[in-house]
Image (cartoon, helix red, strand yellow):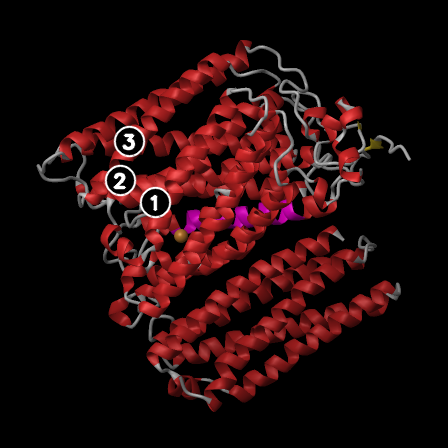
């Protein structure tokens, strides 16, 4: 029986509709998932520029030995704000923004399940970030590192800024949980008829898994933040070691959140790459089921490895051995995914667009980051290298080479859909090469610095053999990355002004979002083709070779 | 459907939040050995009465949901109002208990027991207050005849029952267990 096109009805309830209004007010009052998604991305960009500016100051300070460009106090505030910003207010909103924008489009829905909750969540997160930056206007910004260890985070050792850290992250956390709930309900309840779980785009799958991770991980951070605020404001005893509090409890609660958070920031990138590899290799994903299953496996394992951040706290060999084993285990599902993507590219006709370039670079950089990560699961190596620049190098290889490359890849892939205009591929290549060269220059060498014994989070270093040379190269890399970001900004600005019109489906892609207009109208879809495989648009364009025919035959 | 799934997910997330606080409480019970302190300060019988009232409020809310489904508006109003009154009594009881304890110099800052006790019961109390606001809004809508869909009351009910269940765990942990074991 031939399946019919599906008409997508209007939402049953009329929502506050700002379509008739123009200008800024329309954005402020909007509950439209596309506008909110773009606002999420703009917020992410704003904080990315701020967090990047901080790091340029830091790398300038570190460019030569015994420099006094930044004072130790300011340096402490800058590295704390850099890490906190990039994790909570850049990568998180970037992926949530893409999720909020794309998930309804990819599953053939016209809205999120709860549009008002969507707006609420976004504004909470934005004001959380602004509150965090407000701390610069007070006595000082937070200065205890992004993981804010006790008892350093208590009043007598740190600035007032820690209050803002707690409140900002609490607000951001509430917003993040709200969006996660919204995404799950949307994905479970609003898919177009015909789209079962096996027909869901992999980006949607990964956002679904991520959303569950958020629901389970953020509460322990929120609880820890609330307890810390009670300590600081009402003199409770939770983390004040002098009063019988426990510094270790903070670490447990924080990393019980913190390790899953790492996967909250990488699974969406996995989803993006899974789409990009398919479209730019002209092949369906190799091992759809394995991508999904390994994503779920990563999410489950995420809650059983947090102590690998605490190997040096003296929890004993038995505990360390258990968590070393579980951490090594996580390499398995991640490795499976790498082979899924390699298999997708294998014998494909590959188009090296900027989006695909970032995806290929990701495979290399993320593997390096994964390998240095696995080296940390081996307890004695961790004892030797913890709190050194080796850790800094590792975490940037996974956060930048993994998560941020995912954001860039997704940006170049979906920008034509969001704006209706193409980004310049030529400028994009400049951006890609400058960024990748700068990135590797900055961080590859930090592995060596770490092994040579350079501790992280110290504002300067003495005149030791090679220290100045390596640090100077690292700083040079940071400025090359900054230059790259300027070309990206110019590219976006140029494209918005006079970019080539994109049309609905510039990449000859496979999933439903490319069936909507570019940019999509307020109502995403009037009607949709039947969904009988994970590549409904491919089936539509090539009815003879449709995926579902192979599956049924 | 959608709103009930949303509430389930929210409750799941909240469960992890309370789990973290409970684990912290247990952690300090083990490190600070405050069994005697708990026995000294807490009145398990009085709190038991308030606990029973809170559990009764779950029952009255079920009745309210039931009446609403059968479109027996008057008795739906009645049972919902009873639920709110029982919840208010619980909060009043908690406020009274707090004032008594503070007058006996037990505060957040006085000891590990004080920190754990006020944080855990306090966050639970805040959740009860939020639930009361929610139920009061629903009662207002119901009285005005604006609440025709059954979903809203059932969804709010899920939250209310969850908060009750959390209290049962907290009550057992803080008030009852010190009588039977000493960490
Ligand atoms: Cu970890």
Along the polypeptide, which appears first: circle 2 or circle 3? 3
User: Helix, strand, or loop for circle 1?
Assistant: helix
Label 1 is found on which chain of the structure? A
Residue A313 x, y percent position in the rendering: 28, 63
Residue of label 1: A372
Residue at image position (33%, 79%) is B32
Q: Residue at x 61, y 33 (%)?
A: A101
Q: Which SS class for mark 2? A: helix
- Identify whether A495 is placed above or below A316: above
Residue B43, horizontal then vertical, whole percent: 49, 87
Tag 1–tag 2 contact (CB < 8 Å): yes
Judging depth in this view, the residue of B101 and A148 nearest the camera is A148
In the picture, which quadrant includes the N terminus of chain A?
top right
Q: Is residue A6 magenta?
A: no
* Number of other residues with Cα within 10 Å of mark 1, as a class: few under 14, some 14 to 19, many 20 or more: some
Same chain for mark 2 and mark 3? The answer is yes
Q: Which residues are magenta?
A: A166-184
As for residue A180 lying within the magenta part, the answer is yes
Question: Residue A364: x, y in percent?
Answer: 42, 33
Chain letter, disc 2 residue = A
First in residue order: circle 3 vs circle 1:
1
Q: Which mark is residue A447?
A: 2
Q: CA distance from mark 2 to mark 3?
A: 10 Å
Marks 1/2: CA–CA distance: 9 Å
Question: Is label 1 on the same chain as label 2?
Answer: yes
Q: Secondary structure at mark 3?
A: helix
Chain containing the residue with disc 3: A
In front here: A403 or A252? A403
Snapshot quadrant of residue A26: top right
Position in image of residue A402 (x %, y %): 44, 37
Mark 3 — residue? Answer: A442
Give the residue at the far right of this rendering.
A1
């Amino acid at each position: 029986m031939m399946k019919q096109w599906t008409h997508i009805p209007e939402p049953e309830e009329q929502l506050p509709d700002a379509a008739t209004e123009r200008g800024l007010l329309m954005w402020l009052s909007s509950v439209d998932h596309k506008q909110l998604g773009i606002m999420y991305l703009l917020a992410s960009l704003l904080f990315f520029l701020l967090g990047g500016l901080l790091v340029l100051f830091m790398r300038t300070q570190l460019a030569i030995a015994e420099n006094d460009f930044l004072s130790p106090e300011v340096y402490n505030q800058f590295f704390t704000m850099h890490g906190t910003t990039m994790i909570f207010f850049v990568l998180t909103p970037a992926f949530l923004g893409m999720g909020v924008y794309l998930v309804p489009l990819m599953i053939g829905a016209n809205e999120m399940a709860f549009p008002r909750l969507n707006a609420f969540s976004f504004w909470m997160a934005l004001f959380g970030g602004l509150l965090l930056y407000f701390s610069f206007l007070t006595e000082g910004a937070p200065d205890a590192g992004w993981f804010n260890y006790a008892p350093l985070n208590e009043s007598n050792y740190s600035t007032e800024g820690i209050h803002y850290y707690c409140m900002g992250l609490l607000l951001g956390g509430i917003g993040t949980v709200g969006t996660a709930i919204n995404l799950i309900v949307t994905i479970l309840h609003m898919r177009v008829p015909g789209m079962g779980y096996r027909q869901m785009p992999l980006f949607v799958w990964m956002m679904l898994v991520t959303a569950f991770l958020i629901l389970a991980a953020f509460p322990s951070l929120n609880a820890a933040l609330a307890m810390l605020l009670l300590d600081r404001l009402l003199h409770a005893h939770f983390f004040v070691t002098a009063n019988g509090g426990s510094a270790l409890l903070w670490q447990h609660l924080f990393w019980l959140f913190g390790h899953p958070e790492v996967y909250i920031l990488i699974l969406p990138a996995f989803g993006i790459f899974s789409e990009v590899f398919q479209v730019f290799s002209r092949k369906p994903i190799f091992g759809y089921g394995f991508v999904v299953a390994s994503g779920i496996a990563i999410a489950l394992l995420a809650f059983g490895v947090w102590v690998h951040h605490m190997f040096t706290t003296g929890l004993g060999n038995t505990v360390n051995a258990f968590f070393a084993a579980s951490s090594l285990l996580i390499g398995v599902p991640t490795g499976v995914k790498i082979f899924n993507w390699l298999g997708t590219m294998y014998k494909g006709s590959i188009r090296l667009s900027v989006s695909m370039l970032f995806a290929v670079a990701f495979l290399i950089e993320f593997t390096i980051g994964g390998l240095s990560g696995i080296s940390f699961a081996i307890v004695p190596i961790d004892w030797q290298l913890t709190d050194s620049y080796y850790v800094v190098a590792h975490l940037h290889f996974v956060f930048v080479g993994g998560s941020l490359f995912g954001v860039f890849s997704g940006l170049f892939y979906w920008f034509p859909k969001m704006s209706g205009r193409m980004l310049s591929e030529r400028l994009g290549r400049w951006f890609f090469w400058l960024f990748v060269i700068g990135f590797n220059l900055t961080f590859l060498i930090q592995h060596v610095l770490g092994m040579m014994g350079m501790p992280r989070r110290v504002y300067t270093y003495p005149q030791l053999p090679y220290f100045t040379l390596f640090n100077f190269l690292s700083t040079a890399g940071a400025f090359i990355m900054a230059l790259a970001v300027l070309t990206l900004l110019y590219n976006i600005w140029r494209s918005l002004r006079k970019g080539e019109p994109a049309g609905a489906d510039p990449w000859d892609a496979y999933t439903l979002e490319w069936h909507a207009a570019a940019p999509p109208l307020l109502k995403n879809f009037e009607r949709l083709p039947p969904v009988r495989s994970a590549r409904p648009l491919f089936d539509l364009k090539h009815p003879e070779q449709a995926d579902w025919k192979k599956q049924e035959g | 459907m959608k709103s009930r799934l949303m509430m389930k997910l929210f409750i799941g997330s909240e469960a992890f939040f309370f789990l973290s606080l409970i684990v912290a409480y247990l952690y300090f019970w083990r490190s600070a050995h405050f069994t005697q302190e708990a026995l000294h300060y807490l009145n398990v019988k009085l709190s038991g009465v308030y606990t029973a009232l809170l559990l009764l409020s779950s029952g009255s809310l079920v009745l309210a949901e039931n009446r609403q489904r059968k479109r027996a508006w008057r008795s739906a109003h009645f049972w919902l109002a009873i639920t709110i009154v029982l919840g208010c009594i619980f909060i009043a009881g908690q406020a009274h208990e707090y004032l008594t304890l503070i007058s006996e110099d037990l505060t957040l800052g006085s000891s590990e027991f004080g920190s754990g006790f006020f944080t855990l019961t306090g966050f639970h109390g805040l959740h009860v207050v939020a639930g009361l606001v929610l139920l009061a809004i629903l009662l207002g809508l119901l009285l005005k005849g604006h609440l025709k869909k059954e979903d809203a009351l059932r969804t709010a009910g899920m939250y209310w029952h969850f908060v009750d269940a959390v209290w049962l765990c907290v009550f057992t942990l803080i008030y009852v267990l010190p009588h039977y074991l000493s960490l």
